[in-house]
Image (cartoon, rainbow, N blue to C red):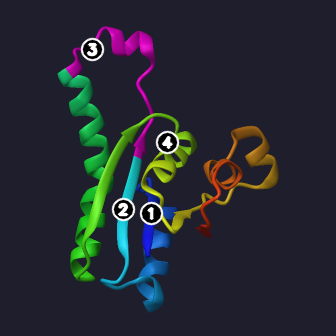
Amino acid sequence: MKILVAVDGSASTKRALAYLAAHDEWLGSHHRYSLLHVVPAVPPRAAAVIDKATLAGYYADESEKVFKPLRTFFVKQGLDAEYLSKVGHAAEVIKAVATKTKPDLIMMGTHGHSALGNLVLGSVSTKVLAQTDVPVLLIR
């Protein structure tokens, strides 16, 4: 099974990994894992005055902060994973990556906003559920 795991380094990501570790059916070399971290884009006006190498380095550093503990987790579990770093709006990028890579499942943690919080702030998980036809496993 191809599993796309959307990660952001937050407590919700840690809960999703804990869920993986606690459920043997989701772990194993018979699954292929792609871990996706989406870095929000630097506003265009700011990006215009930053050289491209510095900007690319910033995006890479932000993703590596998230990926470093995940690499440790997957090594301890004896599993291989592909690490994907993208720039943009998280829900749109997750949908685009899912459309391109055709995973069997998208796994992601939720931040647990209230209904009012989702209305005001929006929810990446809600948008992913609405925009993709791939099954989504939400870990809260």
The quarter of the picture where the C terminus appears is bottom right
Q: In this view, does 19 lie above or below 102?
A: below
Q: Which amino acid, mark 4?
A: Val
Q: Give residue 99's position: percent from left, percent from top.
A: 51, 50
Q: Closer to us: mark 3 or mark 4?
A: 4
Comparing labels 3 and 1, the label whose residue is closer to the camera: 1
Residue 110 in the figure: left or right of residue 60: right
Label 4: which secondary element: helix
Mark 3–mark 1 distance (CA, rounded to whole Å): 31 Å
Element under disc 1: strand
- Which mark sits nearer the N-terminus, 3 or 2? 2
Amino acid type indicated by mark 2? Ser
Disc 2 and disc 1 in contact, CB within 8 angstroms: yes
Tell me which label, 3 or 4, sits earlier in the chain: 3
Residue on which disc 2 sits:
34
Q: Which mark is residue 126?
A: none
Q: What residue type is labelled 3?
A: Ile
The residue that label 3 is drawn on is 50
* Neighbour tally class for label 2: few under 14, some 14-19, many 20 plus, Cα within 10 Å: some
Q: Which amino acid does label 1 sit on?
A: Val
- The answer to whether 78 appears left or right of 44 in the picture is left
Residue topped by disc 1 = 5
Q: Give the range drawn in magenta.
A: 38-52
Q: How far apart are marks 2 and 4 (CA)?
A: 14 Å
Looking at the image, tell me whether mark 1 or mark 4 is earlier in sequence order.
1
Residue pictured at 26% horizontal, 78% vertical? 79
Q: Does the magenta stretch include residue 39?
A: yes
Q: Which of marks 2 and 4 is nearer the N terminus?
A: 2
Whether 61 is among the magenta residues is no
